[in-house]
Amino acid sequence: MIKFDDVYYEPESLTYPLGKQLKEQFAALPWIPIESHNSIKEMQEKPNSEFAQMKRNLIIGTRKTHKYVENHKVSDYLVPYTSSGCTAMCLYCYLVCNYNKCAYLRLFVNREQMLDRIIKRGNKSETPLCFEIGSNSDLVLENTITGNLLYTIPRFAREGYGCLTFPSKFHMVEPLLDLDHRGKVIFRMSVNPQPIIQQIELGTSSLARRITAVNEMCEAGYPCGLLIAPVILTENWKALYTELLEQLRDGLTEKMKKQMFLEVILMTYSYVHRAINGEAFPDNPDLYDRELMTGRGRGRYCYRTEQRAVAEAWLRDEIARILGDVPILYFS
Ligand code: SF4
């Protein structure tokens, strides 16, 4: 169980079944009432150097905005779901762009309402739609606290049309294996070389455990894919990614290798990340590389076009050489 120091909560959340459950689960911690999970002044005023300590707070509220964003990758829509933020601290985490240093875990207790909407939207469509429910957090991690996937997966399987999908960097899939999913949930495991996980994806599961977990999900009948993401062009990136691909070749089951697909995403970074990481994690690698990166608007950085082209060509060849004819859905 993840250890938290304090719970900040919107009082209304205690009227929901999940709110009541969480109140019991974390009864031993101080509960501090807040007006809105979006604006906790005390947190906003903390220095960047306290980023890691801030991640030890649990925030509980209800989700009020339910805007679906079109997406044209594995899913048709990105759907805000039961959590945002995370207890882990990947140094490139995209959520930091949205929440700045307030990228701690927020749980939204109105899950019935959110899943009702997804089911209704899917059932209204003539063609099956796929909903990405994990773009704001890591649902496998969240499930260890809330059990939300145990609620979501069987209910969507019974009542929903189309599919759900979510990615993860965590291995705690055991409770999901026996669920009645009817093949309607696509599980995507995110992978990176172990040295990158250790130094940059702080607080996430090891590569070996992620490989075991995705094998188990595949064996349990879930359609599964792998995200090689984000690809980080460190000094020795070629050697690291060759080793990763070889570990995938050797560690994934034949069943998984036959049915999987890949998504490959190069890292993006930002001014906000640099400011937070520089103060909160001064001893970890600096992901900003002036030579390789360029501005991408609104304080964001991405690898330069020529660098991206080199990385894409090299990775496509290396994937084909080591993993064979596995479909790459996109490279971005
Ligand atoms: S596991 Fe995902 S959500 Fe959590 S810090 Fe890492 S990138 Fe962000």
Image: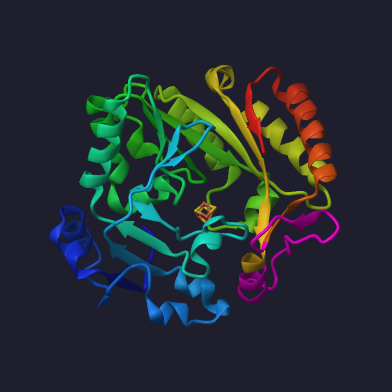
Q: Is residue 183 magenta?
A: no
Q: Nearer the viewer, residue 216 or 230?
A: 230
Horizontally, residue 122 falls left or right of residue 94, namely: left
Horizontally, residue 306 falls left or right of residue 176, namely: right
Q: Position of residue 42 (x, y in %)?
A: 40, 82
Using the image, determine if residue 202 lies above or below residue 220: below
Q: Position of residue 101 (x, y in %)?
A: 51, 70
Residue 178 position by quadrant: top left
Residue positioned most to the left: 15
Using the image, determine if residue 136 lies above or below residue 229: below
Colour approach in the figure: rainbow
Question: Residue placed at 24% from the left, 69% from the top?
Answer: 10
Visible residue check, residue 276: yes
User: Residues in magenta?
Assistant: 274-299
Q: Position of residue 199 (x, y in %)?
A: 66, 58
Q: Nearer the viewer, residue 253 or 118?
A: 118
Horizontally, residue 331 falls left or right of residue 202, namely: right
Picture quarter with the N terminus: bottom left
Q: Is residue 278 magenta?
A: yes
Q: Position of residue 293 (x, y in %)?
A: 79, 55
Visible residue check, residue 180: no
Q: Nearer the viewer, residue 143 or 131?
A: 131
Question: Residue placed at 64% from the left, 62% from the top?
Answer: 298
